[in-house]
Image (cartoon, grey):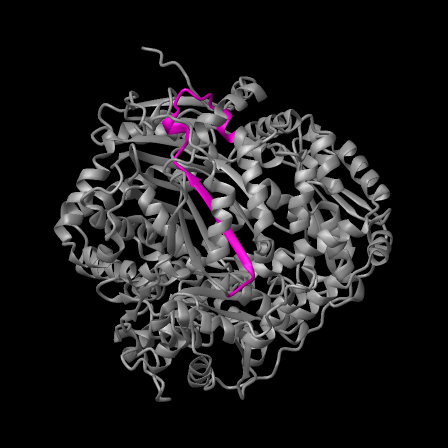
């Protein structure tokens, strides 16, 4: 009986059965067309977009994400780290969760803020203010019960409750059983539209610790921060998302709340729900909880225009550890016509053990332990392509660089290799469709940055349409002998002299 | 025969039933927003979960095939899991099994050289892996369903006709040499490697892979292991994805059914654990900004009778996210650690119980004292009613995630069988969790977290932490009675400095 039901399902879901006579490579486009049938979109009156991808063969679970088009790139000068602080605040609760008396708390927080402002403006804290601060904190601590937000999620079987702040995107995600679907809508509509700047000043200290751990005490973190400063001269992508230490120390709760009001507006957000859910029910709940939120003006953005990179630079970062290396180029972001060709080029250069960077650099010359690549640091222009190399002892970064250049210079690809690269891309997309997390992320990013979730498929189609001529062309235009930033982090003897 | 899970967890694989299910109060038709008070006091509705049974059949040589169809995507996932591993062949040299997995995967097979095989795999867009573990070893592959015959053909070749290319072995050695060099760059790797070494002993269970081990193996040696480690007796072939059962039966029989087992008895018994660890505090200095701390001891064997109490204890103390006691107190309230966790972990032939954290060098003592107080409190007073209720709710509501996809369902069934779990374990789990009393958690805390002076501590941090540690131990002599504070040095592994008697 169950088997018959499953077969009935699969008939309903996979409306395009591929025939045996089609070549295996042609099958690819049909598989991704699954998305066109499975993704359901609804836009609320206030501009918030909901995307739902039902997966009825899963257990009674779903993954919910709320995505906000805001990040490090939107921060005013001197306020780096504010978007990330806001992410932390979203876990501190709401007027109803995390406090035993919000009315009293609000007053105390207001008084606390006066003292914080005073310290920021004058640079000092008088003895009187310091005493008052202690007294206020004591009273607040009695009222606070911050773990109660995550507790409410855990109690309902939630897993993976987390968030991330990037250069241009802030995301909140969790997995829950479907019997908590309404709870999730309620929780996100409360905490993300009405967060309380609770424990702001102690969280500021936690963030300083986090900064130490990720950026200062980590060799790769240090290298990354330097690389971004060198790759971009004026565009805000150059600044660290976690913020500079001096900026973090000066952040205030009130200005963070103002930043929130500016960017956490419904038209600036996309919600995704992926899992064993009923689409209409999800839309009804979205209307019920997110629909009531007032629309606000979309944020006005103006970013400095980054000029082209004209000269190469070398960056050496001192750290007592075995070295890591990076090579950074500037490239155009999707949907620029060259963007797909670049992705395919990279698959050809290092996508499997037989590709030249892997075969020559890692296996034959044995100058690298591993080589990988990714684009970033954000999703928009100006975009960079980063090659990350773990060198092998004895560490000779100049030789690694020379070999890398030699490989790029001699790179020639066959039609068969191109097909292999496309096949690998196809499998990558398909396996992504078995992950609730990956589906939610792909849909949200395309909706937010390209204006339409369908770009997940258009992008894929663009990749499959790339020719060998395209590949050769972008290798020439963006990589061969082009300006770049080269960075090494490690002890002095491993630097590029 | 359908398998039913009792209590609040049933699972229905049918969209029609979901729509018409009137008892599923997750589907509220009315549009009135719930108030906070209403929302927070509402109990989640029971989930209807009825797990599908996979198709099972046995090949001529005893391999059990477990197939659960999942037609959502045109992909297939296969794992052949064998009952072989380091624990059953303790005389195998330390580097051999990891190397063997790598060389079988990359070194060519049958008529194909290393590059030729790689080409075949990449043309299919498939992925393959070979792994030799402690108790189980496997070959796994995935790719397009349309390529299923080719995938089976290649996997059989890789498993039974590996070419063990010597260049690939050399590459593996060189890469592992580099990994060994880089070990000390990560303070937590230093801490966990040292901890295992001291707790389990280097004779066998706590052996650390060192550069000298890499020179002990060559292709001939690896070749000699194939017969012992690649066996069908007691093995499982787990298949999920889009496939037709009829053709799958043919393929499995064709490619794995005629793999004849060599006549040998499988003596699956664990090598004795002769090492007796000494409770002590070992400090490893390094150029690290923070201190990484691990404190622990041996844990229970697999599936102890009080496993439900242990799962709840873990949830309450250290694995339950931000509301666990360790996180709440040490990170949230006192800001003493950016991360902290702890648990009692059951395994065979022994488990490990520990608490681990990262903090500034100056705060190691303060953080440890808080940890001791948290554990002592649970040992003396047990958990609060709220904590019990939260943990029980959390474990029972999240239980469904273990079965949330066909792949997870199939793998879980096989995993539990390989580990000799009782067949109704999952059916009884939630009920057993809800039946646990507060006193049982108290007892489990006493039994497994024992007392601070019986534990082994490893602290990895900047040199200045040493003095603070000395002071901390001296100031808390009643807690640390009988425990020695020692220094160690870490290169590829931990070496203890000799203790000089005054």
Residue B343 visible in the picture: yes
Quadrant in which residue B376 is drawn: top left
Spot occupied by residue A493 in the image (x, y as percentages of width and height): 70, 27
Is A457 positioned to the left or the right of B45 in the image?
Answer: right
The answer to if B97 sits in the magenta stretch is yes
In this picture, is A164 found above or below B48?
above
In percent of width and height, residue B256 lies at 48, 41
The residue depicted at 49 percent of the width and 53 percent of the height is: B248
Q: Residue B150, position in %: x, y?
A: 60, 48
Image quadrant where residue B201 sits: top left
Q: Would you place residue A90 above or below residue B491 in this image?
A: below
Between residue B67 and residue A338, name the one nearer to us. Answer: B67
Above or below for A151 versus B116: below
Residue A70 visible in the picture? no
Q: Which residues are magenta?
A: B72-98
Residue B419 in picture, x, y percent from top left: 31, 41
Side of A268 relative to B269 (left or right)? right
Q: Quarter holding the N terminus of chain B?
A: bottom left
Q: Quadrant of the C terminus of chain B?
A: top left
**In front here: B121 or A202?**
B121
User: Between B495 and A436, which is closer to the camera in this rendering?
Assistant: A436
Q: Residue at x 40, y 67 (%)?
A: A3
């Amino acid at each position: 009986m169950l088997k018959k039901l499953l077969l009935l399902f699969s008939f309903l879901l996979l409306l395009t059965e591929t025939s045996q006579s089609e070549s295996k490579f042609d099958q690819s486009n049909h598989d991704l067309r699954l998305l066109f049938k499975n993704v359901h979109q609804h836009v609320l009156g206030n501009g918030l977009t909901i995307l739902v991808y039902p997966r009825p063969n899963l257990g009674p679970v779903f993954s919910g994400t709320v995505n906000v088009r805001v990040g490090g790139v939107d921060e005013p000068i001197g306020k780096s780290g504010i978007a990330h602080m806001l992410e932390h605040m979203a876990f501190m609760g709401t007027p109803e969760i995390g406090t035993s008396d919000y009315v009293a708390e609000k007053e105390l927080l207001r008084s606390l803020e006066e003292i914080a402002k005073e310290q920021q403006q004058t640079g000092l804290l008088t003895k009187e203010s310091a005493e008052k601060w202690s007294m206020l904190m004591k009273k607040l601590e009695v009222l606070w019960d911050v773990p109660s937000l995550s507790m409410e999620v855990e109690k309902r079987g939630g897993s993976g409750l987390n968030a991330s702040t990037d250069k241009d995107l802030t995301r909140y995600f969790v997995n829950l059983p479907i019997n908590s679907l309404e709870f999730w809508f309620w929780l996100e509509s409360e905490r993300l539209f009405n967060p309380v700047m609770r424990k702001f000043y102690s969280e500021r200290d936690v963030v300083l610790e986090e900064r130490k751990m990720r950026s200062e005490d980590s060799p790769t973190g240090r290298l990354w921060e330097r690389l971004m400063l060198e790759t971009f001269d004026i565009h805000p992508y150059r600044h660290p998302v976690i913020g500079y230490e001096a900026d973090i120390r000066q952040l205030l709760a009130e200005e963070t709340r103002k930043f929130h009001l500016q960017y956490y507006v419904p038209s600036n957000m996309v919600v995704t729900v992926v899992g064993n859910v009923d689409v209409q029910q999800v839309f009804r709940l979205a209307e019920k909880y997110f629909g009531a939120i007032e629309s606000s003006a979309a944020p006005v953005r103006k970013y400095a225009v980054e000029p082209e990179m004209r000269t190469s630079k070398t960056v050496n970062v001192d750290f007592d550890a075995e070295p890591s290396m990076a090579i950074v180029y500037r490239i155009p972001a999707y949907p620029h016509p060259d963007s797909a060709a670049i992705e395919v080029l990279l698959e050809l250069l290092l996508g499997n053990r037989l590709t030249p960077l892997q075969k020559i650099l890692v296996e034959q010359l044995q100058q690298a332990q591993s080589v990988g690549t990714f684009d970033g640091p954000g999703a928009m222009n100006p975009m960079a392509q980063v090659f990350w190399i773990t060198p092998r002892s004895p560490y000779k970064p100049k030789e690694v660089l020379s070999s890398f250049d030699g490989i790029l210079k001699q790179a020639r690809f066959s039609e068969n290799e191109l097909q292999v690269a496309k096949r690998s891309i196809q499998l990558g997309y398909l396996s992504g469709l078995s992950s609730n997390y990956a589906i939610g992320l792909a849909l949200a990013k395309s909706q937010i940055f390209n204006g339409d979730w369908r770009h997940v498929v258009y992008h894929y189609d663009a990749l499959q349409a790339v020719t060998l001529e395209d590949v050769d062309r972008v290798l020439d235009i963006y990589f061969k002998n082009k300006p770049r930033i080269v960075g090494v982090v490690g002890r002095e003897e491993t630097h590029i002299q | 025969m359908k398998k039913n899970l009792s209590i609040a967890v049933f699972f229905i694989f049918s969209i029609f039933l979901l729509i018409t299910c009137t008892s599923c109060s997750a589907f509220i038709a009315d549009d009135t927003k719930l108030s906070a008070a209403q929302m927070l006091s509402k109990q989640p509705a029971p989930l209807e979960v009825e797990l599908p049974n996979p198709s099972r059949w046995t090949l001529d040589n005893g391999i059990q095939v477990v197939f659960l169809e999942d037609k959502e995507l045109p992909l297939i996932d296969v794992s052949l899991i064998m009952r072989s591993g380091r624990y059953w062949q303790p005389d195998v040299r330390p580097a051999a099994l990891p190397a063997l997995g790598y060389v079988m995967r990359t070194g060519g097979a049958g008529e194909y050289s290393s590059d030729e095989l790689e080409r075949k795999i990449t043309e299919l867009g498939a992925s393959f892996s070979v792994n030799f573990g402690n108790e189980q070893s496997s070959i796994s592959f995935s790719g397009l369903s349309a390529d299923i015959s080719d995938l089976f053909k290649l996997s059989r070749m890789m498993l039974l006709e590996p070419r063990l290319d010597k260049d690939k072995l050399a590459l593996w050695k060189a890469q592992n040499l580099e990994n060994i060099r880089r070990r000390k760059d990560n303070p937590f790797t230093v801490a966990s490697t040292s901890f295992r070494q001291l707790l389990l002993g280097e004779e066998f269970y706590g052996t650390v892979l060192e550069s000298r081990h890499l020179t002990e193996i060559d292709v001939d040696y690896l070749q000699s292991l194939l017969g012992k480690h690649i066996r069908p007796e007691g093995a499982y072939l787990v298949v999920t994805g889009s496939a037709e059962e009829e053709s799958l039966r043919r393929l499995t029989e064709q490619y794995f059914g005629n793999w004849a087992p060599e006549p040998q008895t499988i003596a699956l018994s664990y090598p004795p654990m002769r090492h007796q660890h000494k409770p002590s505090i070992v400090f490893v200095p390094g150029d690290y900004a923070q201190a990484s701390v691990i404190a622990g001891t041996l844990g229970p064997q697999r599936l102890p009778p009080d496993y439900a109490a242990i799962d709840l204890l873990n949830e309450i103390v250290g694995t339950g996210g931000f509301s666990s006691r360790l996180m709440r107190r040490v990170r949230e309230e006192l800001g003493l650690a950016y991360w902290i966790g702890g648990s009692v972990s059951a395994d065979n032939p022994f488990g490990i119980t520990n608490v681990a954290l990262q903090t500034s060098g100056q705060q190691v003592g303060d953080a440890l004292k808080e940890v001791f107080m948290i554990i002592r409190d649970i040992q003396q007073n047990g958990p609060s009613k709220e904590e019990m209720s939260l943990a029980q709710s959390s474990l029972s509501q999240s239980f469904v995630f273990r079965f949330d996809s066909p792949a997870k369902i199939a793998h879980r069934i096989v995993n539990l069988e390989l580990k000799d779990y009782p067949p109704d374990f999952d059916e009884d789990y939630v009920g057993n969790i809800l039946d646990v009393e507060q006193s049982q958690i108290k007892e489990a805390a006493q039994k497994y977290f024992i007392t601070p002076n019986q534990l082994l501590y490893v602290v990895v941090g900047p040199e200045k932490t040493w003095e603070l540690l000395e002071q901390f131990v001296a100031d808390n002599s009643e807690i640390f009675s009988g425990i020695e504070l020692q220094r160690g040095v870490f290169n590829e592994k931990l070496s203890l400095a000799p203790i000089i008697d005054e």
